[in-house]
Image (cartoon, rainbow, N blue to C red):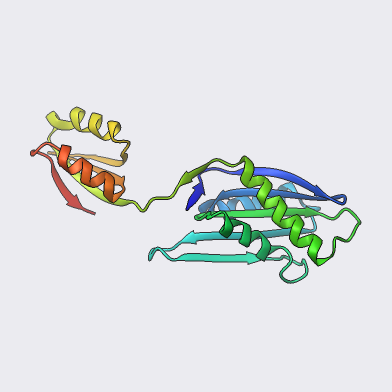
Amino acid sequence: MKFVQKEFSCTFEEKKSKFIAYLMPFDMFDVVMKKVKDEHPKARHYVYAYRYLNEFEQIVENSSDDGEPKGTSGKPSLAVLSGAEIINSAVIIVRYFGGIKLGTGGLVRAYGDSVNEVIKIAEFKEYQKLITKILICDYTELSKLEYLLNQENINIKNKEFSTQINITIELTNEQFQVLEMKLSRNIKIREC
């Protein structure tokens, strides 16, 4: 499974109808939908589809045909996201009608193709289930610990400085097992 970390867009034309597909991280969906409607006030349809993982690691999916004939736009767009194993992402397709009716089969193909086109240009990151841990260290250990975390490509989410330093990190289980073996005995690990 994979996801995007920023917005991508691509334009696709089919029999004079213009389809502009926007692919974005799921948490940007509402902001991008508002922006797209502001940028394209004369568009006929704002079709969307999204897939994300909820807190129980279950995939939640939804789509909308936004006035297109039922099942001709949202569902095919969702099927492309699903087939490409894309999660935590959303796609919005803006359609300008070109005067030529595409028919139900033509609409299904056009919406599916527009999503495929934006996927081709998008940059994806492989999804990995992340866990959060807190490392507690003395000030004298900080630079060595930060160097180690950097070498292991572990994301530092937060640092809290008091009598000791609490470093909140986000990593995979595999990364944690490797890190645990490399940590100095002076560093304590706390669950989040």
- 184 relative to 109, above or below: above
Q: Quadrant of the C terminus?
A: bottom left
Residue appearing at x 24%, y 29% in the figure: 147
Q: Residue 189 vs residue 52: left or right?
A: left
The x, y position of residue 102, in whole percent, is: 85, 60
**Farthest right residue?**
99
The x, y position of residue 51, in whole percent, is: 53, 60
Q: Residue 117 vs residue 89: left or right?
A: right
**Farthest bottom residue?**
70
- 15 relative to 58, above or below: above
Residue appearing at x 24%, y 49% in the figure: 133
Q: Residue 144 vs residue 89: left or right?
A: left
Residue appearing at x 21%, y 46% in the figure: 177
Number of dots carrying numbers: 0
The x, y position of residue 154, in whole percent, is: 31, 39
Q: Quadrant of residue 7?
A: top right
Residue appearing at x 91%, y 56% in the figure: 99
Q: Residue 141 vs residue 50: left or right?
A: left
